[in-house]
Image: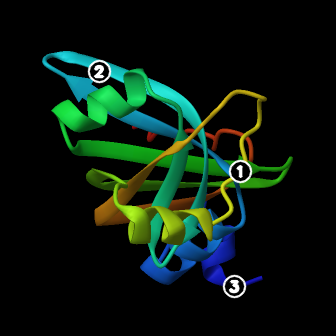
Amino acid sequence: MTSSETQPVTVLTEDESWDLLSGVTLGRLATSVGDIPDIFPVNFVVQRRTVLIRTAEGTKLSAAAVNHHVAFEADAHDVAQGWSVVVKGLAHIVEGTAEIEDAERGQVLPWIATPKRRYLRILPTEITGRRFAFGGEPELIFDVD
């Protein structure tokens, strides 16, 4: 076991963060319109170090059109460890034939049987990731004089 594996929290590199994101398909998109934040579960894929989300017309698309600044988070865990990756960036509504064809090659498959004909692409300005080793709370040691 390396010293980093014994730490309860390990900071991930950018490459490690993108690799982990590429292995899952469910995340959360955080938006804000005015002073009202909102968060949505979304299915996604990583395509050329961007986050590609397939969506229907509605709140997510409208929010991204009003305020392009978004955050996205995905994570996974088992009984011993977990990880979380956060991408902050600009939401771009995918439009135009070439962009839509490129997005369709990403194969973002919907989880529920509703029409989702639109795409959002998050162009990252920052990506951060953490790995967590689960365990009990450490014992507190008090100096008694």
Numbered badge on residue 37: 2
**Which residue is at the far top?**
36
Marks 2, 1: nearer the viewer: 2
The x and y percentages for residue 17 are: 52, 70
Mark 3 or 2: in front is: 2
Residue 110 in the image: above or below residue 9: above
- Secondary structure of the residue carrying numbered label 2: strand
Query: How far across and how far down the image is residue 56, in percent?
Result: 52, 31
- Name the residue beneath numbered marker 1: 76
Q: Is residue 10 left or right of residue 81?
A: left
Q: Quadrant of residue 34?
A: top left
Q: Quadrant of the N terminus?
A: bottom right
Residue 2 numbered mark, or none:
3
* 10 Å crowding of disc 3: few (<14), some (14-19), many (20+): few
The residue lying at 29 percent from left, 53 percent from top is 92
Tell me which amino acid carries mark 3. Thr
Name the kind of residue labelled 2 in the image: Pro
Q: Residue furthest front?
A: 97
Disc 3 to disc 1, C-alpha distance: 22 Å
